[in-house]
Amino acid sequence: MTASRVAPQILTITLNPALDVTTSVGHLAPVRKLRCEAPQYEAGGGGVNVSRAIRELGGESRAFIATGGGMEGRYRKLVRESGLNVRYWHVEGELRFSLTVIDRGAGQHYRFVLPGPEFAAEQVDGLLSSIMRAMPSGCRFVVGSGSLPPGMPVDFYGRLARLVHERGAFFILDTHGAPLRAALEQRVFVVRINAIEANELARLASISSVTLPGLARQLIERYPIDALLVGNGAEGTLLTTADAQCQVRPPKVEVVSGVGAGDSFLGAFTLALQRDWSMKDALRYGVAAAASAVGTDIAHLCDRDATDRYFRIIRDEGEGAEFRPAT
C-alpha cells in the first residue's frame, strides 16, 4: 500500500515506541525452559497504533516517531510495510521492546514492557520544533498517545498541547500519571482515561462523587478541557462535555484479548471527528472499533468490516453530546 498524496489532517505522536513481540506457550511455569511458538512482530507504541487503526478504517494520518538503536531498522521496516506516512526523530539509546506471552492452557496472556531509552532534557525544544514542522498543512488534530520515555520532562505533553492550540489545531491526549496531570493544566481538546485514572484525578483534585458521571462532570469543571472520555470496560465509554453527557456500551462480543482496544478506539474516534461527524457518533465509532479489536488475535488492532457492523447496531444513552469542533 502507498500513502495518500492528500495531506492528512491528523498527526499522531509516539515518543516511546516499542517493537512488540507476541508468542505463546502451552503452559507457563517457573524455572524450567519454555518452548515458545514462532513470534509475531509489530511496530508498536500508542501513536503508531492509532495511525495503524486509522489506516485500517480507511483514513490517513501522519505518524511522528522518536526512535533509535540497533532495532530501529527492523522497526522502520515494519512501519514501512504498514503503509504509514511517517516523520522520524532520531534518539540515542536502544528502542524498547515489549513481550506478550500467551498461556494457551490457561487462556491468559502476560505482558512484559521494558523502559525506553533515556531522553536528554536539552533535546526537548528541538523535539517540539520538529513536531511542529511535521504537522501537515491543514492539520486539524494532533494525538499524543502513550507513555513518555525516561528523562522526558513530565510537562512535555502540556507544552505540546499549548503549541498545538496556538497553531489552531486540536490536541487529543491519551496518557497517564504525572504527564497526564501536567497536561491537564493546558488547553486540551479531548482527554481519554479509564475509570481508575478518573478516580485518581478526582482524589488529587479533592473531588468526591458517588457516581462516575458526577465525577466526570466535576473534572470537566476543574480542568480546561473540552471533552473527557472515560473508558470503563464492559460498561463502555462515558463522554462528558461542559453541557452534555453520553455513554455508549459495546455490543456483546467474545473477548479474545483487550490489547489494542484503546488505540483502536482513539483512532476511530479521531478519524470520525476529522470526517466532521458529531461527537456522539465519534464515540459510537470508537466503541465499535474497540469491540472489533477485542475479538481479534492479541497482535491485531481493529477490523474495518467488524467496526462498521458494530457501529450500525450500537445505541447510545444520555443527553446526546452533539458537540463538534470548529472547522
Image (cartoon, rainbow, N blue to C red):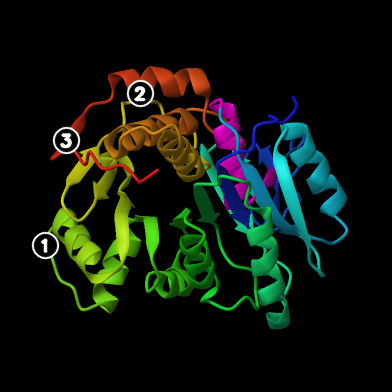
Mark 2 crowdedness (10 Å alpha carbons): few <14, some 14-19, many ≥20: many
The amino acid marked with disc number 1 is Val
Q: Is residue 142 magenta?
A: no
Can you identify the residue that label 1 sits on?
210
Q: Is residue 49 magenta?
A: yes
Cα separation, mark 2 vs mark 3, equals 14 Å
Q: Earlier in the sequence, mark 2 or mark 3?
A: 2
The amino acid marked with disc number 2 is Phe
Q: Which residues are magenta?
A: 43-58
Can you identify the residue that label 3 sits on?
317
Magenta segment main secondary structure: helix
Cβ–Cβ under 8 Å for marks 1 and 2: no
Relative to the observer, which residue lies in front, 36 or 250? 250
The C terminus - image quarter: top left
Query: Residue 311 has which mark?
Result: 2
Is disc 3 placed on a helix, strand or loop? strand
- Note whether 238 is above or below 97 in the view shown: above
Mark 1 crowdedness (10 Å alpha carbons): few <14, some 14-19, many ≥20: few
* Residue at the image position 58 percent from the left and 50 percent from the top: 12
